[in-house]
Image (cartoon, coloured by chain):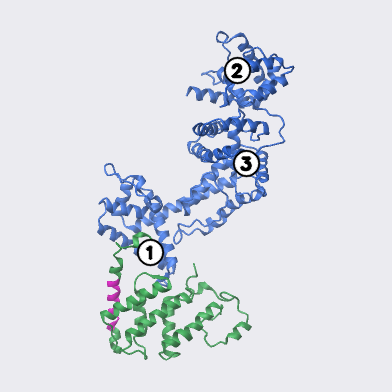
Chain colours: A green, B blue
Amino acid sequence: MSTLMLPLFQLERYSTQVAVEQILETNEKAIEYGLSLTKADALELIETRDEVLQQIGRIEIGSATISKLINAFYDSSFINQQEYSETLSELLEIFYYMKNESLELISDDDLIDLMKDYFENRCMGSLELLKNRELEKVSRNIRFGVVDIYDLDEDQEQQQEDGYENGYGSNFNKDDFYWGEF
Amino acid sequence: MKEKALTSETGINPDSIDHHNFTVSLLNIGLSKGMLSLEKVEEIQKQLMILLSDTILMYTKDQSSSVKTEIAQRIFQSILYVLDVSLRNVPAPEKAIETLKNTRLEEIYSEGLKTIDLQMLQTKQLMVEIQDNKLSVDMISYQESIDNINNEFFCEYDVRFDAHNGIASIDYPLLCDDMSWDGMIYIKNYLKKLNWENEFCNNFSVEDINKLLVGMEKKMGISYKELLANMSEMILINACCSVILGRSAYELMINETAYKRLETILSNINDNDLLKLLEEASIAVLDEISIHMTDRRQYFVSGIKKMVPMIKNAIMENSLSGLLVIDKTIMNDDSIFYAGGRKLEDEELRILIKEILGCQSGYEKSNLINAEIHNMEDLIDVFNSYCIFDSEYETIFSEIGDYGIAMLVSEMIEESPMTDKINFEIEPLHNSENELYWKEKLLQYLNACTSNKYKTIVKLAKNLKDAKLG
């Protein structure tokens, strides 16, 4: 990156402050479910976000993702106050991991919705199953060009018999999502 | 980047600016000179991040707030490229810094996009001209580079997310290419120079250009169709050598005898004189083919100057023939070179004149003159010395070449200011009897030439006279 981004750059401090405020705002609704985050929790979430982004080679402008994730999951039946912050950290990690694995074919909102659906209705609150089973299947569907990438129940052998093409499959239209790989 | 001193009294030293990272360079200079406060620079950085954020969202069509690092970097570089384009339009660096200070970055960016749009139109126009004047040679790199720019660049150039990337496979090398630029700037410059080179090359016959290519093919051992060589460079170097040999620039083909004379000339001069000789030869070439526009002339003169170390090296290693195309099928050497060649000592000249007198025919005399005379003064001394007679002059003049004849007649030009008509006058009072005699023979020879040859020689003679007077 340009040297413009180096030591003099104060935006990081500016954006962290805004991000903390956005995260703490979610407490207004989350408290109805007995959940809330402290300022320290918020800072930890931001730190987790930054670490994960760096590890997997992504850049995010702004902090909307954290708030969106919180707003989607605070009403989950499987999250309690004791594990709230830690669960959100792991969900954040899974989210960014999936952004790469999905080849940018799933929008932020759709991915969060997907994660919530699977977490609640298929994984019964297990983050391990969410990441290593459900979302792994979605990634595999994308890599093998399965038409319906959300179909997690179709047998893999059946997929091969039906002769899916490498890539995205004959009926798969990238424009149906939002943008393809650059 | 090398540190350059900043001019403190009169403004910013333009050499201290990195023109390839213009915006960042201006910010650094502005901050160091106190023209921009730290707070202002931070504010500009924030605006830049907002611009980046907005552009990333545009890239992802608002569907994602994160992208892979390399994509973000590419978009960031693209934004800086557009800002650079915009700020380079500002007349002075001080004013550009003022612009950064007083104008929102979004607005500067928007102006940059408009400038690039305009450059795109200009570049498309250049392509139209190139399609019109491109050479009909079967050189793959040349033809494909033009096609690739036409098909790839114009269709795929992405000013929003990839402005710094001039997408096109370009293999054909230019005479003088500046690859430090990229994106639209590079493509536009490439086409501008290619257009100039096409204009230059179109002054020469396709047949001769193909002969040069075939000559290179034999030298390099690969088909000329696959050569990655610049055609105007080949033509320019051969044309310059032709002029140095006293011939017309249009006579690209050099035979072995002429080559040997050329080798002798170039081996016997020092480095400074070599540079000067080649520079003057390139100017003579451009004069002869009527390329008068300053930018084009500077381009081709720079081209020959760039070749000087290569030519010098070739001379030192006795491999000058590797740089030229020598046509072994040309038997008759029609050039007597006289520019820059060694002048004979008086005793040598006296012996030569005696030998010439002993020759039985104009043809024998011509061969002897070709072999021994390398200087115009010596040639004129021979003409003045009662050793050549009648039709022997015609034989000798036909061997001299157009440029040589032009040099001889340039002294005799009389221009009528009323009609612009050119006449040749021989002043009886200032010429000896034999001088009058051979000069009359010269004018008779000139008047008997074909119309085209006459015009070429007269034009050259006039240019030579103007150059002397100027």
Badge 2: residue crowd in 10 Å (few <14, some 14–19, many ≥20):
few
Q: Vertically, is B52 above or below A142?
A: above
Position of B172 with respect to A8 (left or right) is: right
Q: Nearer the viewer, mark 3 or mark 2?
A: 3
Q: From mark 3 to mark 2, how far is it between C-alphas?
A: 34 Å
- Mark 1 / mark 3, whichever is N-terminal: 1
SS under mark 2 = helix
Q: From mark 1 to mark 3, how far is it between C-alphas?
A: 53 Å
- Mark 2 / mark 1, whichever is N-terminal: 1
Position of A68 with respect to B322 (left or right) is: left
User: Disc 2 designates what residue?
Assistant: B380
User: Disc 1 designates what residue?
Assistant: B52
Verify whether residue B370 appears in magenta.
no
Whether callout 3 and callout 2 share a subunit is answered: yes
SS under mark 3 = helix
Badge 1: residue crowd in 10 Å (few <14, some 14–19, many ≥20):
many
Please name the amino acid that badge 1 sits on: Leu
Q: Vertically, is B45 above or below B306?
A: below
Would residue A149 be visible to someone looking at this image? yes
Please provide the residue range marked out in magenta.
Answer: A16-28
SS under mark 1 = helix
Whether callout 2 and callout 1 share a subunit is answered: yes
Residue B322 shows which numbered tag?
Answer: 3
Badge 3: residue crowd in 10 Å (few <14, some 14–19, many ≥20):
few
In percent of width and height, residue B70 lies at 44, 66
* Tag 2 subunit: B
Please name the amino acid that badge 2 sits on: Ile
